[in-house]
Amino acid sequence: MAIILFLLFGLVVGFIARAVMPGTQKMGLIATMILGVVGSFVGGFLVSLVTDNRVTDLNTAGIIGSVVGALLLLLVMGKLSNRNVLA
């Protein structure tokens, strides 16, 4: 049951991050869910850098930290996908 709630939380975080980020992100529900889950982990890592929590502890960053992590992930993905590749 906890895994299903975590995936739903990731989906909500992914939707919020996609709504806040300007421009269009072409991804489906599964990619949005993965974005939210990974963003939650990135947010947890960032929170552990500024607090006394260890990175190896299983802690959630909360909705704000998760959205910030997902936004950072979207920003990095956008920069990497817009590179001009010269052949």
Image (cartoon, grey):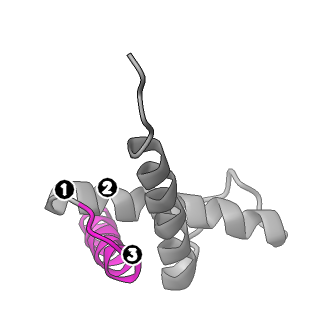
Q: Answer yes or no: do the residues labelled 1 and 2 have beta carbons within 8 Å?
A: yes
Q: Is residue 45 left or right of residue 29?
A: right
Please state which amino acid type lies under the numbered disc 2: Ile
Q: Residue at x 37, y 65 (%)?
A: 36
Please state which amino acid type lies under the numbered disc 3: Ala
Q: Magenta stretch containing residue 19, yes or no?
A: yes
**Residues in magenta?**
1-25
Q: Quadrant of the C terminus?
A: top left
Of badges 2 and 3, the one in the foreground is 3
On screen, 19 above or below 54? below
Looking at marks 2 and 3 on the same chain, the residue that comes earlier in the sequence is marked by: 3
Question: Mark 3 — residue?
Answer: 17
**In the image as oriented, which residue stretches furthest toward the top?**
87
Q: Is residue 18 left or right of residue 39?
A: left
Dot 1: few (<14), some (14–19), or many (≥20) neighbours within 10 Å?
Answer: few
Measured from the top left, where is residue 8 in percent x and y?
25, 72
Q: Residue at x 39, y 75 (%)?
A: 17
Tally of numbered discs: 3
Question: Mark 1 — residue?
Answer: 30
Mark 1, secondary structure of its residue = helix
The span from disc 1 to disc 3 (Cα, nearest Å) is: 14 Å
Mark 2, secondary structure of its residue = helix
Mark 3, secondary structure of its residue = helix
The kind of secondary structure the magenta stretch mainly shows is: helix
Looking at marks 1 and 3 on the same chain, the residue that comes earlier in the sequence is marked by: 3
Measured from the top left, where is residue 25 in percent x and y?
27, 63
On screen, 56 above or below 12? above
Q: Is residue 74 left or right of residue 4?
A: right
Q: Which mark is residue 34?
A: 2
**In the image as oriented, which residue stretches furthest toward the left?**
28
The span from disc 2 to disc 3 (Cα, nearest Å) is: 12 Å
